[in-house]
Amino acid sequence: MTRYANVVVSRLNVRENPGTDSKRIGYVVNGEKIQILENQGEWLQVQYTEEKTGFVAAEFVTISEEFVYAKTLEEEAAELAAKRALEERQHESETQVTEDTAITVTPPSGNYGSNSELRNEIVNYAMQFLGNRYVHGGQSLVSGTDCSGFTSLLYAEFGYSLSRTPSGQLSNAGRSISYEEIQPGDIICYGSGKRCTHVALYIGDGQIIHAANPRKGVVTGNATYDTILGVKNIID
């Protein structure tokens, strides 16, 4: 399995060493991905070109994992073209091409022909924040929030008002359903006894996306990884 840094800002500099005072060796743009060699926390060491490694700021990328598989001729050609583009950027100075770290997020379309389409849109919107930071009490999907902030802020983008706490979402959000009825976009509430301590968004196929903790940030995982206290259907 290979780990990649997926760029979520308009333009991100690749540095020779970790730190903004280090020499720039090139840049990557929104939507591009580069292989991660080492996660150093605030900085990621990446394979910039075939011959050169560098560092990018972790706060401006999301991290994904991909299994190795046989590439088609078209994929190999696209990969070669991308490598050539990166190599050409090494010759552009930092004054010629400035860094632009405005995080790019595609907002909800607002056009849903059915509840199923709405659910898919919620899941797709949530996945844009995969790899972002966990910030206790945070109020931003981009710069960081916690588990209940993640679900409440997501749903706020679609016109739904949810409690800001895990217990409030278990008690007051939508209607309670069984896990056997769960659909993408539903909220799973976790905890022990009757106390809800964590919430996550169900994305389908037994998986969730959630702001897990300060160490992991926003990640995907197994929906039954912990004790489920309840499942909440917000949409219908």
Image (tube, rainbow, N blue to C red):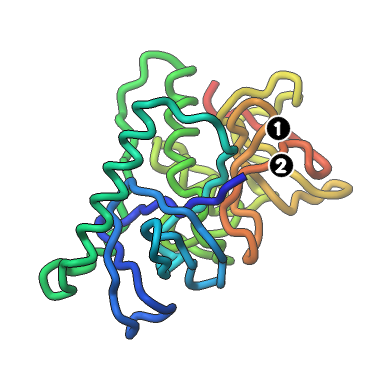
- With 87 as the anchor, is 67 left or right in this view? right
| Identity of the residue drawn at 47% across and 54% down | 35
Q: Which residue is mark 1?
A: 231
Q: Identify which residue, 206 or 154, lies in the foreground.
A: 206
Tag 2 residue: 189
Q: Residue at x 70, y 19 (%)?
A: 181
Query: Where's residue 228, x and y in %?
Result: 79, 39
Determine contact: label 2, label 1, CB under 8 Å. Answer: yes
**How many residues crowd around disc 1 within 10 Å: few (fewer than 14), some, or many (20 or more)?**
many
- Measuring from the top left, give residue 55's x and y in whole percent: 42, 70
Q: Is residue 184 above or below residue 223?
A: above
Residue 72 x %, y %: 42, 25
Label ID, residue 219: none
Q: Secondary structure at mark 1?
A: strand
Mark 2 or 1 closer to N-term?
2
Vertical placement of 17 versus 64: above or below?
A: below
- Quadrant of the frame with the N terminus: top right
Label 2 vs label 1: CA separation? 6 Å
Q: Measured along the vertical axis of the image, is residue 229 above or below residue 117?
A: below
Q: Amino acid at mark 2?
A: Cys
Name the secondary structure under disc 2: strand
